[in-house]
Amino acid sequence: MKLLLKESLCKKGGKVKEDGYLAKDNFYVVIDGATGLGPSSFFPSDASWLKTQFQKKFKACSDYDSQLEDLSHYFYEKFIKRVNFCEDSSLFPSLGLAWVELKESKLCFYQLGDVEIYVHKKNHQDISFRESNLPTLDEESLSLLLKIAKEKNITPLKARPFIQEKLRENRRLANQANGYGVFTLYPHHHLPIHRKEVLIEKGDEIYLASDGFMQLVTAFGVYPSRYDLFSSNKSLISLYRELKKAAINDPEFVRHPRFKFLDDATCLKLIVL
């Protein structure tokens, strides 16, 4: 068996692209960068810097799973030299990661942060693999956003700056027992990678998608479920056009409350041969 990259999509939502991906024989990665919540001297952004540096280093690893924490320590040292050290982890950039490796007839999943893995199987017993706590934290932040918008009689877009401290609180939960897993820059912390092995068959489709792409389901509701999205048989670029249209039709975030007008959107479509 082998994995074939059938389609790829990686679009920036704003001025800077902080998503990325890697593609090698039977090994595929999607990377979703998150900007640190503080002043930054990095150009074009600290998350873009981390994403680009990570792509180079991760691609050269001999054991992707075991060497991930070494990379966290390595980038921590590089980062603090640029910012003259800081202890507030909410100021650090981070990366959501998901990658798959094919080993004989088994597909090995690795997931950390808000990148999802979805297996669309020929027998329709689909498998969805994603971080469970982040959606809850996002819902809390969006509820606060709507509350402030109502109290101040402003749109959710204009209320966005008022939830910055809540977002900082959430960032400080990264890789904590009551928080969520993500690749970030720590000298000592453990990275809680989610791992899973799945038996696959020829013809199965595997999708790796950033949370920006998944807003087709989660934020905009263009598709009512992940199954509806990934069984639509539409090209990734066609799906992206639907995503962009939904954002354009709601510029003030009124119909579809969210944190950004349009997030970076990345998705890989793989097929088992």
Image (cartoon, grey):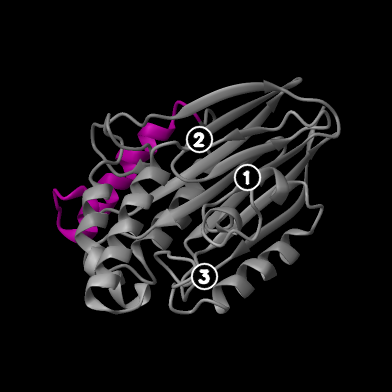
**Picture quarter with the N terminus:** top right
User: Secondary structure beneath disc 1?
Assistant: strand
| Quarter of image, res 184 | top left
Q: Where are the magenta residues, as a range?
A: 65-91
Left/right placement of residue 141 relative to residue 97 reads left
Mark 2 and mark 3: Cα distance apart in space: 23 Å
Q: Amino acid at mark 1?
A: Leu
Q: In the image, what residue occupies the spot 48% across and 53% down?
A: 32
Left/right placement of residue 8 relative to residue 256 reads right
Q: Amino acid at mark 3?
A: Gly
- Between 101 and 136, the one lying in front of the other is 136
Residue 148 in the image: above or below residue 226: below
Q: Of label 2 and label 3, which has the lower sequence position? A: 3
Q: Which residue is mark 1?
A: 208
Q: In the image, what residue occupies the spot 47% across and 61% down?
A: 18
Residue 195 in the image: above or below residue 96: above
